Image (spheres, rainbow, N blue to C red):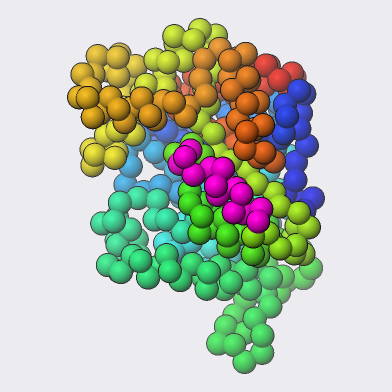
């Protein structure tokens, strides 16, 4: 299965480059326009040699239209032919494992051999929304049961519950019960050491959320590699990191665009989620000293500027972390700016045409 995981670097890129899409919705725009932009980015990514395109599960966030990854992936599968498509990720505690196995078995039937199933254990939202999703106030229970849920999901995907198990006669369809077929490779996602250690112990590929937990990146990757045990999936570790990156022809414009994402994140973290603000609003916003400290720390971990500057920043980050793949997510109010960023980064590395 490692052939379904490991990519090949294109052009002068040090490792394979991929795309993480949040389907962000800016002020003055709509979810319809955001999802059309997602289709445009997926088609561009395929044409220019990006290895995979993932969408992430978020809930109750007006500025993010990716609450249903499986639905979006089915739409993207109809508009692409080769690029790998997947979740970055599906939040396993929010769903019954059988439901996820059915959804991603369906996607695999639609786009054979190019679907990834990335799994996280966070809720992808605030506590009240998580309780509504899970119909339970005990959110810690869902996270604590993640290894058990993961094992159950993999058995549904492989259709191999042992005789005597309560689920032995239950089949995820589409799936192996219909005949020999491939299935989506499972990735574990994380922003701390828990999933890093679990991914290593199970011999699974690991994706780390560097874009919002940069201080933990190197320790988590070290833990993953130290914990790794060869498996039928991988004989050696394979670690990918999510990286916030935005390229524009002009460095000042890149700063204007990423400030919109920074202000949006500030509002989210302080309980005021909304649409991604326009650059003019972000420029005029009067930050308190505490808010300024948060925003400056957030911007420090976004690789942004001219295409050459972004290329140099990505090269340095890959060298520092030893990541086997970089998955880029563009923080910007404007859909066209996000689309153009991926094009400029591909140009900077001489990828595709």
Above or below, 323 relative to 201: above
* Residue at the (63%, 19%) spot, across then down: 312
Range shown magenta: 213-226
* Residue at the (68%, 78%) spot, across then down: 160
Relative image position of residue 348 (x, y in whole percent): 67, 16
Relative image position of residue 219 (x, y in whole percent): 55, 47
Which quarter of the picture shows residue 259?
A: top left
Above or below, 209 relative to 353: below
Quadrant (top left/top right/bottom left/bottom right) for the C terminus:
top right
Residue 330 appears in the picture as rendered = no
* Residue at the (44%, 26%) spot, across then down: 300
Q: Does the magenta stretch include residue 221?
A: yes
Q: Is residue 304 left or right of residue 7?
A: left
Above or below, 340 relative to 20: above
Relative image position of residue 134 (x, y in whole percent): 35, 65
Quadrant (top left/top right/bottom left/bottom right) for the N terminus:
bottom right
Above or below, 268 relative to 347: below
Q: Is residue 47 magenta?
A: no
Relative image position of residue 152 (x, y in whole percent): 57, 73
Count of numbered circles in the view: 0
Looking at the image, which residue sits at the far bottom? 164
Majority secondary structure of the magenta segment?
helix
């Amino acid at each position: 299965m490692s052939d379904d995981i490991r990519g090949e670097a294109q052009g002068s890129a040090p490792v394979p480059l991929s795309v993480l899409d949040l389907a962000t919705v800016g002020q003055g725009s709509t979810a319809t326009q955001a999802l059309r932009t997602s289709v445009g980015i997926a088609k561009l990514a395929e044409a220019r040699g990006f290895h995979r395109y993932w969408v992430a599960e978020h809930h109750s966030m007006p500025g993010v239209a990716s609450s249903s990854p499986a639905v979006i992936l089915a739409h993207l599968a109809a508009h692409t032919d080769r690029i790998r498509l997947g979740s970055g990720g599906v939040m396993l505690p929010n769903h019954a494992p059988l439901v996820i196995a059915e959804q991603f078995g369906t996607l695999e039937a639609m786009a054979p051999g190019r679907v990834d199933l990335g799994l996280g254990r966070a809720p992808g939202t605030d506590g009240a929304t998580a309780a509504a999703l899970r119909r339970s106030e005990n959110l810690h229970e869902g996270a604590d049961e993640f290894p058990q849920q993961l094992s159950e999901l993999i058995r549904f995907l492989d259709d191999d519950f042992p005789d005597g198990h309560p689920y032995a006669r239950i089949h995820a369809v589409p799936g192996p019960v219909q005949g020999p077929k491939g299935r989506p490779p499972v990735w574990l996602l994380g922003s701390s050491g828990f999933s890093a250690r679990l991914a290593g112990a199970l011999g699974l590929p690991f994706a780390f959320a560097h874009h919002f937990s940069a201080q933990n990146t190197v320790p988590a990757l070290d833990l993953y590699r130290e914990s790794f045990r060869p498996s039928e999936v991988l004989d050696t570790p394979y670690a990918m990191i999510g990286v916030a990156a935005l390229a524009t022809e002009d460095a000042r414009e890149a700063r204007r665009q990423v400030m919109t994402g920074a202000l949006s994140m500030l509002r989210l973290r302080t309980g005021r989620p909304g649409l991604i603000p326009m650059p003019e609003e972000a420029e005029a916003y009067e930050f308190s000293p505490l808010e300024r400290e948060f925003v400056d720390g957030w911007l420090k971990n976004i690789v942004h500027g001219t295409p050459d500057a972004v290329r140099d920043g990505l090269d340095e980050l890959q060298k520092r972390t030893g990541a086997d793949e970089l998955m880029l997510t563009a923080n910007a109010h404007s859909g066209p700016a996000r689309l153009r960023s991926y094009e400029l980064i591909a140009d900077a590395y001489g990828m595709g045409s």
